[in-house]
Structure formats: C-alpha cells, structure tokens
Amino acid sequence: MVFGCSRVLCSSSLLKIMMSIRSWRCEVPYSTVDVSPGLGHTPVMLKEVLHYLDLQPGQVVLDMTFGGGGHSKAILNTVPEVTLLALDRDPTAICLAEDLAKEYPERVKPILGRFSEILSLLSHMRIPERSVDAVLLDAGCSSMQMDQAQRGFSLSKDGPLDMRMDGDRYPDMPHAADVVNTLDQQALASILSAYGEERRAWKIASAIVEARRSSPLTTTHQLATVVAGAFPAAAMYARKDRLNRPSHVATKTFQALRIFVNDELNELHAGLLAAQSALRPGGRLVVITFHSLEDRLVKRFLQGEDMSNLDEFHFEQKQKKAKYAERPRERSEHWAPIKRKVVTPEKQEMLENPRGRSAKLRAVSRL
C-alpha cells in the first residue's frame, strides 16, 4: 500500500489497512485494567473550563470525554442540580462514571460509546437534538490510560503494544503491534508523518521494518528502543517540551500510532458535528486539545471552514500557508466565539501538572 507521506490517510484508506491487518495478529496480552485509578487525577485547566461552560443550576451538560472524571466531578460539586451525561469509549472510564452515578444519584448518566455514536445514543436516551446546555470535549488520551502500563500508551512504562482506547470492545480492532508488524515501510512512514508530524518518519519506519525481521515488536519499550536507534546520538536529547525538558524521540511515533489505531481525528470531527447538533441555541462548547493536528482541526471547524475533505484538509500546513492566507476568513453560521484567542494553561499549572503543558482551550457558543 502506498500513501503520500505529507497527507493524512482518508477514512477509506484507513479501513482497507485495518482490514488487511486483521489477517495477522501478534499475540499481545490484554487484561481488564484496574478501575480504581481516576476521579483523583488532575483535570487540565479546570478553572477555565468551569468559567467558559458557565453552567447554571438544573442545566444539562455533556462531558464527551469523561476519562478519569476530574472535570465532571468538579462540575457536579460546583453547579447544583446539574445533569451530567458522561460519555467515553473506554469501558474502564464508564466503570468510574457508574461509581460517580452512585455518589450523585439521578444526576449522572454514563454513556459507553464513541463520538461518532453519540447522537444515536442520545436519541435512545430520548434526549432530543438542540437540547443540551453545554458540551465539554477534552480530546486525546486520558491520564488514566497513560498510567496503566498494560494499555500500551506510555513510553515510560513497559507494557504490551496495544493503544486501543476501546479496550476489548471490538475484538477485530488492530493493536499498535499489529500496525508496526504488518504494514510496509511506505505505509508506516505515511502514518508517522501525517499523524505524528515526524520529520524522520522514513528512517524510523525503516528501523521498524528491519527490527521486526528478527522478531515481532510487542512491547512499548521494544518500540521505543527501535525508534531511538533511528536517531543519531546527538539528537537523543535535543527535543524539548514546553517546560524545556528533554522529550523522548519516540514521543511523536507513539502519538501517530495511537491516533491511527483509534481513528482519533475522524472521531474528533464526528464529535464536533455531534456537539453542533446536540447544543441548544446559546449553548456552550469548550474543547481542549493537546497537539497541533487536533487544534488545527477544531479551529477551522469552529471558523466554519468546509471540512468535507478532511483527509487532505489541514495537514500540509507549510505548503498551504500561502493558499490559506489568500482566502478571506470565513465566519461560521453555527458558532460565535466566547474567547477569540486560544487559552493555554498558566505557568503554575504547567509546573504542577506537566501533562497539561501543551493543552489549548477554545470556547464558543451555539448560534
């Protein structure tokens, strides 16, 4: 399979790859994770989220990414009689939401599903469109998922190379190990370039293909070691995060694989469309993103740009910069900005919660 490395893989291409991967399955053990973590984790930009949601007593709020429940619990503690719809695609998160529902009877409604399923799920719950007062969408991987080594998301904890946000809900869904052990060098490089914006995508893909000839890559540490081997020694600690700390050279590779395995960008677009349908006029949407691909998609969606060609729309940033500069700024017929500029964490919060250092918050109201 051959794909242009500067473009994201479209839905149809992704589906074809997924189907081909299913013919090979590396035995990656996956066990049900401990559901005790969560609800005590530190939610990102909590003060700003509560401010921009501006919830009133008795309103209905949809938390589209419940995760460990930090934002949701703060909402319940802050706003009297608010009804919380707690959506997550991860069964572990829904177990936490069910625990929270016991703590706040009749106020929490756990919903297991993806962004692309939410309108159907709400319909089954007899919640009509254009009736929700506020929506929170905290995109990306949750701290709870990162902290569970057996989920395979973390660079710092060795575990099976899994990365499926849905857990075992879809048995045929490929693991990250299936991707790195099955796809050819061109396809791997395309994924790393498109979803990780990795400049050394081709060399990393080459290193992966070479390494798997000896034995399949099945753990996070194995993959991280192979990726590190594709970099010269001088580059090992050259990358820095927003706190100017050394960033592991495999970070972008892990991001790319996670996004690909979970079809995150198409799901994010589906989530934005769902929020647009679910919110009442005047209802508020707060979106938190953690990397440039997410933020670029959200920004342009909220500005009203045509997102029908998502596979080739927003990834060739440098090449299309002049093209976009020539176009007049579009105004959305669905959204009005509450805060025109993107909101980022305060310096103190970044120091106290380094995982949220790259977060960007955008807040709009439904027209």
Image (spheres, rainbow, N blue to C red):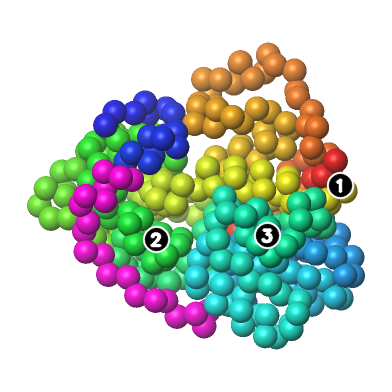
Q: What residue type is labelled 1?
A: Pro
Dominant secondary structure, magenta:
loop
Q: Which amino acid does label 2 sit on?
A: Tyr
How many dots with numbers?
A: 3
Residue 122: mark in rendering: 3
Find out whether the residues at labels 2 and 1 contact each other: C-beta distance under 8 Å.
no
Q: Is residue 120 above or below residue 125?
A: above
As helix, strand or loop, the secondary structure at mark 2 comes to: loop
Q: In this view, does 360 lie above or below 70?
A: above
Magenta residues (range): 18-38
As helix, strand or loop, the secondary structure at mark 3 comes to: helix
Q: Confirm whether residue 291 shows in the render.
A: no
Q: Residues within 10 Å of mark 1 (few under 14, many from 20)?
A: some
Tell me the residue that label 2 is attached to: 170
Q: Residues within 10 Å of mark 3 (few under 14, many from 20)?
A: some
Can you give x and y, in whole percent of width and height, for residue 344 in the image? 70, 50
Residue 281: mark in rendering: 1
The Cα atoms of the two marked residues, 1 and 3, are separated by 18 Å
The Cα atoms of the two marked residues, 2 and 1, are separated by 36 Å
Left/right placement of residue 59 relative to residue 160 reads right
The Cα atoms of the two marked residues, 3 and 2, are separated by 21 Å
Please identify, in this view, whether the residue under mark 1 or under mark 3 is nearer the observer: 3
Find out whether the residues at labels 3 and 2 contact each other: C-beta distance under 8 Å.
no
